Amino acid sequence: MPSLKKLAFSAVLGAFIFQGCAGSPPILEKTSWQTFMRNDARTNVSDDSLTYPLVIAWEDDVSASTAFKGYSKEQLSSPVFYDGSLFVSSTDERLYSYDAYSGKRSWRFNASFPLEATPTISGDRVFFGSGDGMLRCLDKATGKEVWSYQARSEILSSPIVSDGRVIFSSADDRVHAVDEKTGERAWTLGRATFKTVQPRIYGSPACSGGRVFVFFSDGALVALSADNGSELWSKGGVVRNFDSSIKTRRTPLVDGGLVYVIDEKNSVQAFSVETGEAKGTFDLMKAYDMVLPDARTMVILGSDQIVALDRLTGTILWKKDLRNKPSSSVFALKGTVFVVSNYKTSFLSTGYFEKDNGYVEALDLKSGETLWSENLKSGISSNGSSGHSRIALFTDRGVVEVLRSR
């Protein structure tokens, strides 16, 4: 049963949730998913609508080596859909552009360093960071470099584009803003944490209403002005340890006047975007990922379970044990929640020659019923994406897999 603490917050949450939710944009054939978790607010929800079952539209292997597939690096970048194209960054140091419908490769760009962050598409340009701390801007049509900006450490975050500025964080606890057209620095904010070794934070800033929300390595959630980088508010100690055997979502989600994060105890917390005031806590289970698929529903993903609840009342709508575990990520589109999981198999059940496998499952948002599922050819660490009436996945073995309705 939901705690009284949750119910006490429900009235306040309701006022924020329905703010700005009067209507949804129409479903378009070219619905974009143009950055990590779809948009600058990192909502992780598409306006697409699919029918099931899904079938493979096309796939491509972009792994670093094709001679031996036994040892593969985690692929942490998600595919992105934009204007009829699909873009993927790979640890093989290249960024690829495809025709989203046919899978025909349009171009590839060699960055000479591993790419672990999802690219961001805005207008006719592609923005992405690499392991050498370089943020690059490419021409979307040709893949030719337009400009580059050098940060002092690796870039693991996906950029956001706000009012003509490209904003991203680097691993040395700095947030940067550069001019979208020229790459010239607009501002940089550093937050001294006095740690000899900084943790690798696999999270990206979120942005809404001219405010940037980002985690720093001291565990603080900070709101910055997108205009000049000034600190608007800070909540210390939200996360103290960024290292975990299961990767927890460390990217804020902004919706209806609230910014949602997963805290140190793996509870979902909601804060006012304006003041940072705590507005609610959801601690029904240990959360590793979350999504808000409509104006009232929250879906929380645990290691081996998934639960849907009413954000206003805290009422559990449904709860489901995952068929395969541990979970990896969750994303949503109209009426459907997609869960990506991993599991291991071994030859003759001997414990030797273990193999990582991936699994994707589509659940009905109202009931939690499984609508469709598929086993993947390897484990998967990156988030899935939905756009152009398709689903795109990128496995750790370096295979881009795009699915569509039959």
Image: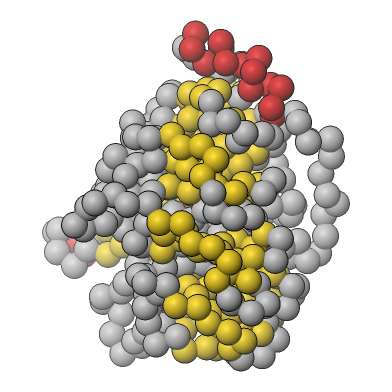
Quadrant of the drawing holding the C terminus: bottom right
Q: Is residue 149 above or below residue 9?
A: below
Q: Is residue 104 left or right of residue 344?
A: right
Q: Residue 276 in the image: x percent, y percent?
A: 53, 31
Q: Residue 255 in the image: x percent, y percent?
A: 65, 38
Q: Residue 122 in the image: x percent, y percent?
A: 69, 69
The residue that appears at 71% across and 60% down in the rendered structure is 163
The residue that appears at 64% across and 65% down in the rendered structure is 165
Q: Is residue 143 above or below residue 172?
A: below
Q: Is residue 81 above or below residue 23?
A: below
Q: Is residue 317 above or below residue 35?
A: above
Asked whether 240 or 53 is in front, the reply is: 240
Residue 393 visible somewhere in the drawing: no
Residue 334 visible somewhere in the drawing: yes
The residue that appears at 27% across and 43% down in the rendered structure is 241
Asked whether 103 or 53 is in front, the reply is: 103
Q: Is residue 345 left or right of residue 386?
A: left
Q: Residue 228 in the image: x percent, y percent?
A: 59, 55
Asked whether 8 or 237 is in front, the reply is: 237
